């Protein structure tokens, strides 16, 4: 069974699956804001905005502090950095034989065993930006981002994408590492297909699934805008720790 200890990614992608919450994060890049200030642009009630803020707070994407009677919200970009690191593994695949002739994947078992452990020849584990696949200039569609982030908010579905990054696979091959029923697994595939993250096609009698990377590119493009913000937070933390040692 493929095991992903990624509760934080579940919460991050789940929180990002709503355009109102993403708009709130955009506003917080300009600085701390009161709840009433954050609610102004939206045609929804203050309690509804508060529920969105609670989801963002649970995902540690923002923190709330009280100053007297005023409560200020502040963006915390660390979870976005972690999400970027995950998405960054989906660079344009390099043929394993070309990148590492001594250790190509030879069997389906090899590919499944590596589902949660990206092969360095294909997924360099780096947070440097931009990875080669994410270089398109795109106008991002809010509904597409909603569906993409929602689909990514579940570890089984992320593991499926990791498997498909290596090779096209049949449904039964994909389902083999997971300790869930075939109907339950098929539900995950339908969610991924609805989000255009996979494509299914028939080859003879076999129904093959293939990774479609474009929505992942778009999700990474959206998160990329926050890199400057989390770098500033890390710099400020480094300066604080440095001053504390003096």
Image: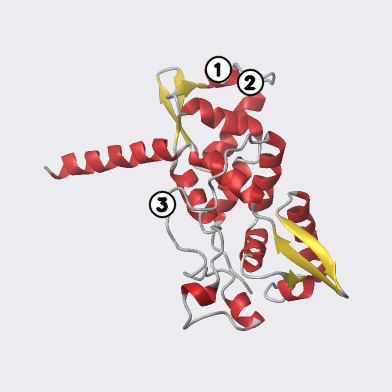
Element at label 1: helix
- Name the residue beneath numbered marker 2: 46
Element at label 3: loop
Discs 3/2, front: 3
Q: How is the image coloured?
A: secondary structure
Where's residue 26, x and y in %? 52, 29
From the viewer's side, name the closer residue of 243 and 63: 243
Q: Residue furthest left?
A: 246
Q: Work out which quarter of the rendered image holds the N terminus and state it.
A: bottom right
| Contact check, label 2 and label 1, Cβ < 8 Å | yes
Q: Note whether 240 is above or below 133 in the view shown.
A: above
Q: Note whether 195 is above or below 233 in the view shown.
A: below
Q: Residue furthest right?
A: 205
- Name the residue beneath numbered marker 1: 36
**C-alpha span from label 2 to label 1:** 7 Å
Q: Quadrant of residue 176?
A: bottom right
Where's residue 59, x and y in %? 54, 43
Q: Work out which quarter of the rendered image holds the C terminus and state it.
A: top left
Element at label 2: helix
Crowding at mark 1 (Cα within 10 Å: few <14, some 14-19, many 20+): few
Q: Is residue 4 visible?
A: yes
**C-alpha span from label 3 to label 1:** 36 Å
* Residue occupying image coordinates x 56% and y 39%: 222
- Name the residue beneath numbered marker 3: 128
Q: Is residue 185 left or right of residue 81?
A: right
Q: Which mark is residue 10?
A: none
């Amino acid at each position: 069974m493929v095991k992903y200890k990624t509760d934080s990614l579940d919460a991050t992608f789940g929180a990002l699956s709503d355009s109102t919450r993403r708009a709130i994060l955009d506003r917080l890049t300009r600085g701390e804001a009161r709840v009433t200030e954050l609610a102004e642009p939206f045609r929804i009630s203050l309690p509804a905005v508060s529920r969105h803020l609670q989801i963002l707070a649970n995902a540690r994407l923002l923190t709330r502090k009280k100053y007297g009677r005023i409560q200020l919200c502040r963006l915390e970009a660390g979870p976005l950095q972690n999400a970027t690191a995950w998405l960054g593994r989906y660079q344009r695949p390099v043929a394993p034989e070309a990148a590492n002739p001594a250790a190509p994947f030879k069997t389906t078992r090899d590919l499944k065993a590596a589902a949660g452990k990206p092969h360095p020849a294909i997924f360099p584990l780096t947070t440097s930006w931009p990875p080669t696949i994410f270089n398109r200039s795109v106008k991002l569609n809010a509904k597409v981002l909603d569906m993409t982030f929602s689909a990514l908010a579940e570890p089984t579905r992320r593991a499926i994408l990791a498997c498909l990054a290596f090779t096209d696979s049949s449904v039964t091959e994909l389902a083999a590492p997971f300790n869930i029923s075939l109907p339950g697994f098929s539900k995950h595939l339908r969610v991924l297909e609805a989000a255009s993250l996979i494509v299914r096609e028939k080859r003879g009698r076999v129904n093959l699934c293939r990774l479609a990377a474009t929505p992942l590119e778009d999700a990474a493009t959206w998160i990329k805008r926050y890199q400057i913000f989390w770098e500033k937070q890390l710099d400020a933390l480094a300066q604080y720790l440095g001053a504390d040692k003096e």
